[in-house]
Image (cartoon, rainbow, N blue to C red):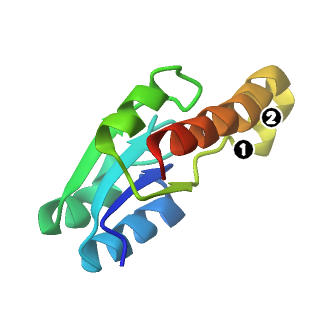
Amino acid sequence: MIGRAVVTGGAGFIGSHLVDQLVNDGAAVLVIDDLSTGHLDRLSDARNAGDVTFHQMDIVASEIGDVVQRFAPEVVFHLAAQADVPTSVADPARDAMVNVVGTVNVARAAVESGA
């Protein structure tokens, strides 16, 4: 059983369902999402039913490591991404920044937190 979990992209369609399941299983959950495509209202049931903390943040932000370390998770589920094709064509540098640098930041935060 997972006691403490971080879910990046947790306000998205898939992430919010994962958060619901983790809360139903009794986990404390930290959701990190910049709300660029996610919606906070997708977390309302989980926030009412369990221990859910929401932090609005871009995974590219260097502060993500501190946020994750303070929460001290056992596991990190990384679901945040820039997945919109028209956006990736219009701004490939931003697409790479979020999907590559953001993933490196999340992975580093997970390792440094002991998850």
Instruction: Specify the amino acid type for callout 2.
Output: Ser
Q: Against 81, is 27 above or below? A: below
Q: Against 27, is 108 above or below? A: above
Dot 1 falls on a residue whose secondary structure is loop
**Residue drawn at (36%, 79%), measured in percent from left and top?**
1
- Mark 2: give few (<14), some (14-19) or many (20+) Cα within 10 Å: some
Which residue does the numbered mark 2 point to in the structure image? Answer: 88
**Residue drawn at (80%, 34%), measured in percent from left and top?**
88
The x and y percentages for residue 62 are 53, 20
105 to the left or right of 1: right
Q: Choose between 43 and 111: the one closer to the eye.
A: 111
Instruction: Specify the amino acid type for callout 1.
Output: Asp
80 to the left or right of 71: right
The x and y percentages for residue 81 are 65, 44
Q: Against 45, is 104 above or below? A: above
**Residue drawn at (72%, 38%), measured in percent from left and top?**
99
**Residue drawn at (45%, 54%), measured in percent from left and top?**
7
Q: Choose between 73 and 26: the one closer to the eye.
A: 73
Number of numbered callouts drawn? 2
Residue 84 is tagged as 1
- Mark 1: give few (<14), some (14-19) or many (20+) Cα within 10 Å: few
Q: Name the outermost residue toward the left.
A: 48
The x and y percentages for residue 90 are 82, 26
Dot 2 falls on a residue whose secondary structure is helix
Q: Which of the 4 image quarters holds residue 23?
A: bottom left
Q: Which of the 4 image quarters holds residue 82?
A: top right
Instruction: Give yes or no for contact between labels 1 and 2 (Cβ–Cβ under 8 Å).
Output: yes
The x and y percentages for residue 105 are 61, 32
